[in-house]
Amino acid sequence: MSEETKEAEVKDYHFFESITLEEPESPVSYEIAMPGVTLLTGEDGIGKTTVCKSIYEYTANAKVPAFKATHVTMLDARLLECYSMRPGSLYTNNAAGNRALRRMRAVSLAAYDEVSETGVEVVEAIESTIRGRMFYDEDSQKFFFKPSGKGKLRVPAENLPSGVRTLGVIQMIAAKFYDKPTRPPILIIDDLEATLHPAWQIVYANLLFKFAVKGVRVLSTAHGVYTLNAALHVMRFHEEDGNRPRVHYRAYVGRAIGDRSEFFDVSDDPNALMDPYALHMRKFL
């Protein structure tokens, strides 16, 4: 990549390098652009979570002035433990999770009457998918699910299917998402998509673009071909439909290079994006 191109990318949207994050001895190297929706894929252990955590630390802690007024949210699979946690308890050594948990605990049923403009389409799409709303009850200090059209019925969150709990986390975060921020917010999602049924992985991919349309810069790991294919189709749909805003999209695949991992930009090469999955499939054919 030329210096001229690199400077243009920094100017247009956030561009992250592993060396920038002061990890010269890290076994993971990357150059990640986050212009709208960015997906990371690759085998387990390749470093997807490492990339997500390091970019979160870099942006959330405002190590450079550009991020001092930036709202940064990170969601990961550990957040799903919130449904079975003791009242008032927090995560151990998980500042990002505690930040998200506090926002989720601020979502009562009444909160859905005043959803921010940034999150309203995400909330509605999830409600249509899971047929209800996830919320936090301050009196019992527990999460519940309110099914649509079922009167006063509410279901304890720990009794729900894993997919409903997963999308419920995103629904509550969207309900309390930052409205009219001074700088584009950053949303990082790691490992949540892996818990979803393939049909809901398609929904998940669409949700990422709904956030991005509102100016949120999204970074998400992706584990399934349904998520990856859906993201490509939604991206092209936004490009071809003149009535929809264009959403910039990038995709990276992690590969083992000797004793380290490296992430490669495959945004313009769908075949390379699917190669890790095709390789394993060929073993059974």
Image: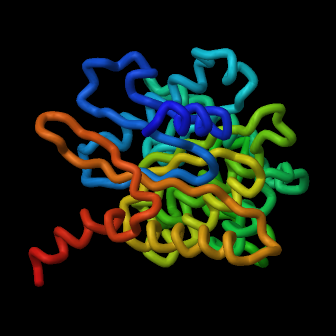
The residue sitting at the bottom extreme is 285
User: What's the residue at 53%, 57% (across, down)?
Assistant: 166
In the rendered view, would you say 168 is above or below 23? below
Residue at the far right in the pictured view: 114
* Quadrant where the N terminus is found in the figure: top left
Image point 49% across, 78% down: which residue? 199
Q: Nearer the viewer, residue 192 or 210?
A: 210
Based on the displayed image, in which of its 4 quarters is residue 106 positioned?
top right
The type of colouring in the image is rainbow
Residue visible at 70% across and 19% down in the picture = 68
Q: How many marks?
A: 0
Instruction: Judge by depth and name the residue closer to the eye, 159 or 26.
Output: 26
Left or right: residue 233 compared with residue 265: right
Residue 245 image point, x, y percent: 77, 64
Residue 44, image x, y percentages? 25, 50
Q: Is residue 122 visible?
A: yes
State the image coordinates of residue 218 (x, y, percent, origin top left).
Answer: 60, 48
- Evaluate whether residue 147 shows in this view: no
The location of residue 123, given as percent across then percent down, is 74, 61
Residue in the picture at 42% in, 37% down:
31
* Quadrant position of the C terminus in the picture: bottom left
Residue 67's quadrant in the figure?
top right
Q: Is residue 266 above or below residue 237?
A: above
241 shown above or below 84:
below
Looking at the image, residue 41 sits to the left or right of residue 188; the answer is left
